[in-house]
Amino acid sequence: MAEYYDLLGVSRDADADTLKRAYRRLARQYHPDINKDPGAEDRFKEIGRAYEVLSDPQTRARYDQFGEAGISGAGAPDMGDMGGFADLFETFFSGFGGAAGGGGASRRRGPRQGDDLRLDLSISFNEAVFGQEKEVQIRHLETCDTCKGSGAKSGSGPTTCGTCGGQGQVRRATRTPFGSFTQVAPCPTCEGTGQVIADPCGACGGQGVQQVRKKLRITIPAGVDSGTRLRVAAEGNAGQRGGPAGDLYVYLFVQSHDKLRRDGIHIHSDVAVNYLQAILGDTIEVDTVDGAANLEIPAGTQPGTTLTLTGKGVPKLGNPVARGNHLFNVKVQVPTKLSNHERDLLEQLAGHHSAKDHPHKSGLFGGLFG
Ligand code: ZN
C-alpha cells in the first residue's frame, strides 16, 4: 500500500482541516456508486484507511514514528495472544487492547487513555555498569495549552454531530462481487465521537492535543543491560477527553567496549603476560571498570588460565551492593626476538633441561611445575 500521506495527496505536516478536505474530495471521486472504473473501489478503501489513521492524532503520531508497523493492529479486537511479542507490542497497541467495556466506535466517545511510546536509547558500557543521568529528547502528544484539551475555541463547546445524530456511527452500503452489505462504520464527520466542534481551536485543529518536543532527564540505574526496559510514567501521549496519559518506555542498548566484555554481572577481558611472568609469577596492573587494579599472576600460570578479581564486575540491577567478578583470560607471550645475553641464559637452561630423563619432574622446571 502506498504511503498514507501520498494516498491523500497531502504533506506530512498537513493539519486536520487539510486532511479532511483531501479525504472528502477523494472519497467523492472514488466512491463506488459514482466511479465505475476497475480499481476505484480498492482505491476508495485505501483512502478511507489512510484517513482513519491520519485523522486520529494518536494513530497518526504512531504512524509517523513507526510507519505501517505501528498501526497494523489498529482496530483489532484483541491483542492478547501476541505470544513472545506481547511485551514489545503492548507499547504500540495499548490504545486498542485491553480497554474495558464497549467495542468498536462507541469506545472512542468516552475519555481515552493516551498511547504508550517507545524510545530506543544507546548508552556506553560504563554507563550501563554504574548508572547515569541522561537527558533525552522525545516527541509526544500533550494536552493543548490553548483550549485545555477541549478542542473548541474559547467560549464555544462541542455540539451534537448532525451527520450521525450523536450516535457516532453511520450505516454504509458496501457493494462487493457477492452482493450489497450494510456496514456500521464510525461517523466520518465526528470520527465516532458523536460530537462536533463548530469552532475548533486554532492551535490544535480541534483535536485537543498537540505534538510537542520535550527534553527529559532519565535516571539509568546501575547494572542495566541491553534489552532492559525503563518505564517513565505519564510521559507517553496525552489522553483525550480527560483520559490519562500513556507511559514512555525506554529500551536500552549497551555499546560494546574495546577491551571489556559483559556476561550478565561478570566482566571478561584478556590479559597478556610474558613467559617469565607466567613461570616466575608477578603482580601486574590491569584495567577494570573501577580503573587500574593489581592482579597477581601466580608462579606457573598456564596459557588460557582464568584469574579472578572478586567484586570488580557489574552491580546487580536493583541491589548494587552485590557485584559480579572480573575474569581475566591469561595470554602468555613468547618472544620472537632475544638479545644475545637472553639467548645464552636460555641455552644454558635448555642444556640443563635436556640432560635429564624426566625434565618435568626435576631441576628448575620440576620445582615450578611439579
Ligand atoms: Zn487546542
Image (cartoon, rainbow, N blue to C red):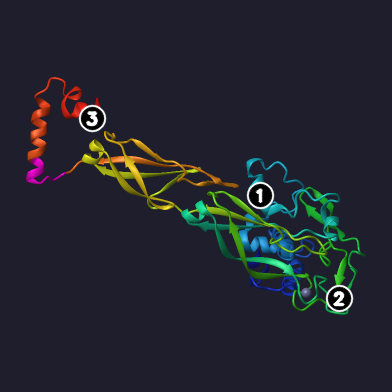
Nearer the camera: disc 3 or disc 1: 3
Residue 116 falls in image quadrant = bottom right
> Disc 3 marks which residue?
368
Image coordinates of residue 57 in percent, x first then y, are 73, 65
Numbered disc 1: secondary structure: helix
Q: Can the viewer see residue 2?
A: no
Q: Secondary structure at mark 2?
A: loop
How many residues crowd mark 1 within 10 Å: few (<14), some (14–19), many (20+)? some
Q: Residue at x 33, y 35 (%)?
A: 305
Q: Is residue 154 magenta?
A: no
Distance in Å between CA atoms under marks 2 and 1 = 37 Å
The amino acid beneath tag 2 is Ala
Find disc 2 in the rendering and name its residue.
198
**Reading the chain from its start, which is encountered first: label 3 or label 2?**
2
* Mark positioned earlier in the residue sequence (2 or 1): 1
Residue located at (26% from left, 33% from top): 300
* Numbered range of the magenta stretch: 336-343
On the image, which quarter does residue 366 sit in? top left
In the picture of the structure, the residue carrying the numbered disc 1 is: 89
Numbered label tally: 3
Image position of 325 (left or right of 103): left
Numbered disc in front, either 3 or 2: 3
Q: Is residue 97 above or below residue 60?
A: above
Q: Nearer the viewer, residue 277 or 256?
A: 277
Q: Nearer the viewer, residue 38 or 285?
A: 285
How far apart are the alpha carbons under marks 3 and 1? 61 Å
Circle 2 packing at 10 Å, graded few (<14), some (14-19), many (20+), is some
- Residue 297 lies left or right of residue 82; in this view the side is left
Q: Amino acid at mark 3?
A: Leu
Residue lying at 29% horizontally and 41% vertically, measured from the top left? 331
Could you tell me which secondary element the residue under label 3 belongs to?
helix
